Image (spheres, rainbow, N blue to C red):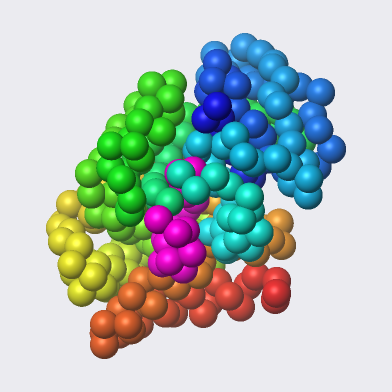
Amino acid sequence: MNRIAILGPGSIGQLLCWQLRHHKPVLLGRSPAPDALVHTDIKDEHHSFTPEYRPLDKARLDDIGLLIVTVKAYQVLDAITPLLQDLPADCAILLMHNGMGPHLDLAPLLNGRSLLLGTTSQGALKQGLWHIRHTGKGLTQIGLLCGDADSGKTRVEPLLDKIENSEWVDDILAALWQKLAVNAAINPLTAIHDCRNGALAANEYRGHIHAIVAELVKAAAADSIVLDETTLLERVYKVIELTANNFSSMHQDIAHGRQTEIDAINGFVVKRAQANGLEAPANLSMLEQVKSLQPRR
Ligand code: PAF
């Protein structure tokens, strides 16, 4: 049987598990098995269900047809590599994390398995170890990076079917670069200046935001991804307006002394620019400043 497994039971992992509950997903993790997952929906109604939970150290994986990976970008390789020998040869893998980058290292290790990438702006907040609150129904996009398009799409159909406001995209890398622009502009500036997203609408941040986005457009172009700078800036300012009262995820990571996703956000822009002989000083400055604020690994 082709089961769906979710690796990384954080807030998005638990939300997807709830949304896929009729498909009997398997949750893979290191914590003791949950008695139940509690889900508080947008209307503030509570629901619960008990997923099949498999502790990672002794999990059987031979029945998994789709592995959805919801760990942070910097955990992806370490989380998946030990599982590869036990996953079926035709198991598709879907990465759903903020930022970009792990796909470049992972794709060559997959022995022909399909690799799908996804991005979600759904909001979910942890209320307890196994309790999440669904806070937003933002867009979810999924597409194929490599492997067989038809079977890749078939494997993620349950997700597209169960997640409101979700879509299949043919050019997932372009979609991810577009989302990256939003995170590259908002996340580090809010972390460095210790402010809510809405504060970035002030004039003093315009120069930084424009430089970050302009460099990102050039880095993407060097990777053959064509983006429109004006449209991206509009999108960044729209998100600033719509999420004005929120503290970005990077702001929260810094505030709680946690590692951030900066390497997969501005760090990825710098890496792709440099790989193509370009410089990205505004993104490099964000990378260095956020690194100086986060705990050393
Ligand atoms: O990472 C985040 O916090 C979010 O992706 C966004 C869009 C920047 C809003 O806070």
Residue at left offset 77%, top offset 41%: 55
Residue 148 percent location from the top left of the image? 30, 45
Residue at left offset 23%, top offset 49%: 171
Residue 249 percent location from the top left of the image? 55, 51
The verdict on residue 196 being magenta is no
Residue at left offset 23%, top offset 70%: 223
Residue at left offset 35%, top offset 31%: 154
Q: Residue furthest bottom?
A: 277
Residue 247 percent location from the top left of the image? 54, 48
Q: Quadrant of residue 274?
A: bottom left
Where 162 falls versus 297 (above or below)?
A: above
Picture quarter with the N terminus: top right
Q: Residue furthest right?
A: 32
User: Which is nearer the eye, 35 or 197?
Assistant: 35
Q: Quadrant of residue 243?
A: top left
Left or right relative to 111: residue 203: left
The verdict on residue 97 being magenta is yes
Q: Quadrant of residue 255?
A: bottom right
Magenta span covers which residues? 91-112
Left or right relative to 1: residue 178: left
User: Which is nearer the eye, 59 or 253?
Assistant: 59
Picture quarter with the C terminus: bottom right
